[in-house]
Image (cartoon, grey):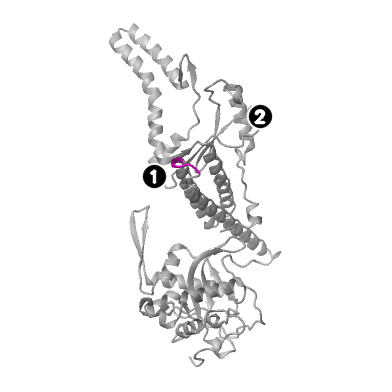
Amino acid sequence: MTIPASSAAQIPQWLHPFRRQPHRWERKRSRAVRGGHVCCGPACAAGCEPVLIRERTAWGWIDWSIPADGSLPQQPSRMAVFTPYATRSQRLALHWLARRPTHRYRIAAVTVRPTTAVITALTLVAATLAYLHGIPLSIVVPAAALVPLVVEDLPAHFDARARAHARIVEAEAACRYLQRLAAVHADLVQAATVSDAWEGRRAVEVGHSLLFDAADLLQCHDTRIASSALIARERLMLHLAAHIGQITASAAAASFGQDGRLDQQPPPGHHLPKPRRPAQLSTDHTSPHSPKEEQFMPHPQDNPEQARAVYLLFAHEAYYTAASQEINTTLVAAASLLHPRVRQPDGARIYQRLTRGRRQCEIVPLSTLTHELDGGIRWPEVGDWEAVTADLLQLIQDRACDALSLRLPDLARALVCSGPHTRVRIYDPVSGRYQTYGPADRIEVLIEVGRQLATAEAGQALWPGDGLLPSPNPTM
């Protein structure tokens, strides 16, 4: 999986503090310099604790140290990512954990919080007043000694409980890696704020989950040990950012085209090469068939054989287009199986089986053929479907035929890959229950594919390619 150079160049690799609100960094830095210690590197005494400025985000926080030369820090000192599925009580605990870092004061050989020092002073005053009012020292002294200890220890106890729902990274290499992912996620958040599309909001949720997974790996393992898993998550994040950027650009172009100044762009997710032959426009448009019959796109052509056009829908390993858009399912005209570059006679036999007894413009998933062939037991009698679909994908990538390339969600893809009577069970981690999807949901997926096919064809059937072999049974 790769990202085109043009798309990768738009993704920032450096996340500086308060990127969209630079005035906040200057204000917080000035306040910290006046009231705290700025670490100046090797010249500082041993055990120097630099002042940290905390930047809160929707997914966690980032702690930045203040360079002595007044420049922006190049790398965070600490990063924390909250669990993406927090309950109300967990969110309150995480809100407590994300409070501003507490500066400690050194008193003799110990360091204390400012609140502890204030509470200790108030406790001494209260103890003195209590003694003057006749309360015995046996009560006043233990109480006065216990209050500062409780105040000093209680926040640490709350922090320990809240840390169970957060992943905090402090190592230099780990912060550097997580900083890159956070920069990409910042772009996802920005895209979601400027667009009302649900894809943007969903991308932010997925990006938060990827950040949490990466922080969990970085917290438990060294970057070299978990490098493969981290690279996989970074690639997913990059592809997600590129895809959302493309959707945002397409939506902007579409809204711009509605004003009459620019032609509206085709919807994303459709990969339809330009025909290599003159277009044959449909002269008759009939209404779609019943959903139970899985029939879509009735566009009869002048050619009698093309009038009974059937479409093959098959899932495959995901690949990415030049625009970094994931493609995991493809639909082609059944006649593409007769292309000379497709493995033969396997393609012709599958074509014969595919078109036998079908209705006009019916979309037939490959899993339906598997079901009809006794669950796949009789596939050897027909042909090698894996080799045939691989050849079809190569034809599509070489633009030797037309295709409708789709990015189906996991559930829709699972239904397409299942037989017409198979049920798919999905576990919902939020509700803790299983939900079952069956034939009716599969039909809904095929109906939606039919709608997208109608939009992609726009009155012109998919071009199956040139030099097709003769049909094994032209009278079918």
Crowding near the residue tagged with mark 2, few <14, some 14–19, many ≥20 C-alpha atoms within 10 Å: few
Question: Where is residue 314 drawn, in percent x and y?
Answer: 48, 72
Earlier sequence position, callout 2 versus callout 1: 2
Extreme residue toward the front, this view:
224
Q: Which residues are magenta?
A: 219-223
User: In this orientation, which residue lies closer to the viewer: 62 or 458?
Assistant: 62
Q: Is residue 135 magenta?
A: no
Circle number at residue 194: none
**Quadrant of res 134:** top left
Q: Residue at x 46, y 19 (%)?
A: 111
User: In this orientation, which residue lies closer to the viewer: 267 or 415?
Assistant: 415
Distance from disc 2 to disc 1, alpha carbons, whole Å, reads 40 Å
Q: Residue at x 60, y 72 (%)?
A: 272
Question: Where is residue 284 drawn, in percent x and y?
Answer: 57, 85
Res 65 seen here: yes
Q: Residue at x 45, y 37 (%)?
A: 95
Q: Looking at the picture, which amino acid does disc 2 mark? A: Gly
Of labels 2 and 1, the one closer to you: 2
Disc 1 marks which residue?
87
Secondary element type, mark 1: loop
Disc 2 marks which residue?
70
